[in-house]
Amino acid sequence: MTHKLTKVGFLALSLMLVTGTSSLAQSQKLQQIKIAVSTATPHNTPLWVAKDKRIFDKYGIDAQTIFVMGGALVSQMLAAGEIQIAANAPAALVSLIAAGENIAMFLGISNTSPFALIAQPSIKKAADLRNKRLGTARFGGSSHVSALIALDHLGLDAKRDNIILMQTGLDPERMAALEQKGLDAAMLQRLATKTMLAKGYSEILNLSRAKIPYQNTVLAARRDYMSSNAKLIDAFTRAVVEGYAYVFNKENKQSVKEIIAKNLRLPNADAAEEFYLEAQEELDRKPYPTIEGTRTVLKFVAERNPKVASIKAEEIVDLSWLKKLDDEGFFDKVYRGK
């Protein structure tokens, strides 16, 4: 009996060692990619899904996603090689590109501005914004550039019309500043806009509904890294596209809401409903970055940094990675008609 138990024990130990070695070998095969995200927004849902549902693992990738406050810092980390992929606003990238950094934007996470220009109830039309204070987040970031685009679309000019642009934090801080009369208007995203409209504040312009070309957020990488790690970037792109397919599959709604709630630190999945709807409405099933939207970014960033005026959108947008998948029918495969 003892001899048999010894043999069974030895066999079990052997199986554990083989299984452990196999798991270790499998984990060692995963190639690490560090991805920095500059804003906590539902536009990043495909990335969160690809991580949470182990889609990255399926493609042999150990995706390390980190949140870094501020697009400028994310851009600097990308240029320094501290991260491999930046999920960032092009507005934060193009100044570095103008300074000589060879960075390409290869996937359009958000191809429209998510902002609306919301004003005090007494402000009813664009002309009423003259001599007023307009709140954004950081200068050079997406909300700031969206403010410049909004003013231009409305026939206004910040300098000429004495509109004071103020850095006043994220949506909650800008909402509070409006209510405390510290701001006359502010750039706000979907949920904040809905909240303020319910309180009687005025919507002067919704950039998404106005269909103004604007490249809001992209995935970007250094070209030297992409060329020397072509198989890895291809695998990464496939994993992200599968993340998109998972998000757009209505059968996954509850799971997607749970992932959004976890990443936005919401109390529960029910609290993620509006963010889920935002992702459904504003993400593109084929997330190509747009040339026209990138031109809009370049135009307004060049007003603060003249060197950016020499950049052509076609030179910094790389459509080849998604086009390869498109040509081979990869999108049709992962969406399966859903």
Image (tube, rainbow, N blue to C red):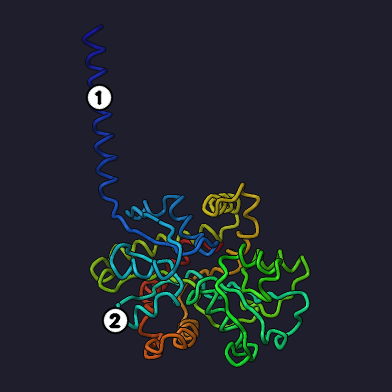
Q: Residue at x 70, y 66 (%)?
A: 180
Q: Front-most of 32 and 327?
A: 32
Marks 1 and 2, how far apart in space? 57 Å
Q: Residues within 10 Å of mark 2 (few under 14, many from 20)?
A: few
Report the number of numbered marks: 2
80 horizontally vs 47: left or right: left
Residue 315 point in image, percent of width and height: 35, 84
Label 1 SS: helix
Which residue was labeled with disc 1? 13
Q: Amino acid at mark 2?
A: Gly
Q: Amino acid at mark 1?
A: Leu
78 horizontally vs 282: left or right: left
Q: Is residue 143 above or below residue 298?
A: above
Q: Quadrant of the C terminus?
A: bottom right
Q: Quadrant of the N terminus?
A: top left
Residue 174 point in image, percent of width and height: 62, 67
User: Which image quadrant for residue 200?
Assistant: bottom right
The answer, for residue 279, to whether it is visible in the render is yes
Residue 193 point in image, percent of width and height: 68, 68
Q: Residue at x 54, y 62 (%)?
A: 41
Q: Front-most of 134 and 58?
A: 134
User: Which image quadrant for residue 102?
Assistant: bottom left
316 horizontally vs 151: left or right: left
Q: Residue at x 46, y 50 (%)?
A: 52
Which residue is farthest top? Answer: 1
Which residue was labeled with disc 2? 100
Label 2 SS: loop
Q: Residue at x 36, y 51 (%)?
A: 57
Disc 1 or 2, which lies upstream in sequence?
1
Residue 335 point in image, percent of width and height: 50, 62
